[in-house]
Amino acid sequence: MSLLRVGVLASGRGSNLQAIIDACREGKIPAQVVVVLSDKEGAFALTRAAKEGIPAIHLNPQSFPGKEEYERAVSAVLKDHRVELVCLAGYMRLVGKTILDAFPNRVINIHPALLPAFPGLHGQRQALEYGVRFSGCTVHFVDEGCDTGPIILQAVVPVLDTDTEETLAARILEQEHRLYPEAIKLFAEGRLKIEGRRVLIKN
């Protein structure tokens, strides 16, 4: 079976990117990261990619007249590298129609909360402030909303009385690093089917 060609969009340190790269290298998922693209020039995710010999590209949104033009450029880079699945890994921009139309049902994201609870920024802080007993992470298909796409996988993490935003985030991140490669594996094996809001996982 040929390896699924994955493109990663990242804005920060890229720890989920590293988890995906490691899972590919270790043969845990039938995929390969073929390009990493960031909207931030100094993103450590680009350093991680370059160190692994993966094309690492910075595209500055400010260099384009608007979001549509920027996303056209992003889509062109992804298509140049024959990307089959786009993974958001700490990508701090809402993905719009231009990229979604270029890669229909082929853009996924990971979020540090149990969606639909606590979408958007600072999911861990939101969970602590609300006083929930459990939080976790969610891998989902991306639509034009903010963390509103169909859910692929979720992992649950207990919220402890002693938790700070940092300690909860660290425990959730451990699950993110496990869950994201698992979701990519299911996609690569052709086992995901979207029916309305539900994602069915075929045996």
Image (tube, grey):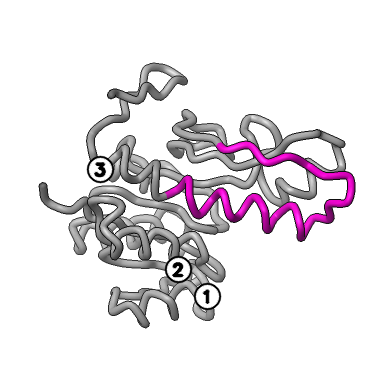
Marks 3, 1: nearer the viewer? 3
What amino acid is at disc 1?
Ala
Front position in the image: 42 or 44: 44
Question: Mark 1 highlights which residue?
Answer: 43
Mark 2 neighbour class, 10 Å CA radius: few under 14, some 14 to 19, many 20 or more: many
112 in relation to 51, above or below: above
Element type where label 2 sits in the image? strand
- Asked if residue 56 lies left or right of residue 110, the reply is left
Question: Mark 3 highlights which residue?
Answer: 188
What amino acid is at disc 3?
Ala
Determine which quarter of the picture holds residue 119. top right
The tag on residue 38 is 2
The majority secondary structure of the magenta stretch comes to helix
Mark 1 and mark 2 in contact (Cβ < 8 Å)?
Answer: yes
Residue 61 x %, y %: 48, 67
Magenta region, residue range: 155-180
Q: What's the residue at 37%, 21% (across, down)? A: 200
What amino acid is at disc 2?
Ser
Front position in the image: 106 or 102: 106
- Asked if residue 68 lies left or right of residue 175, the reply is left
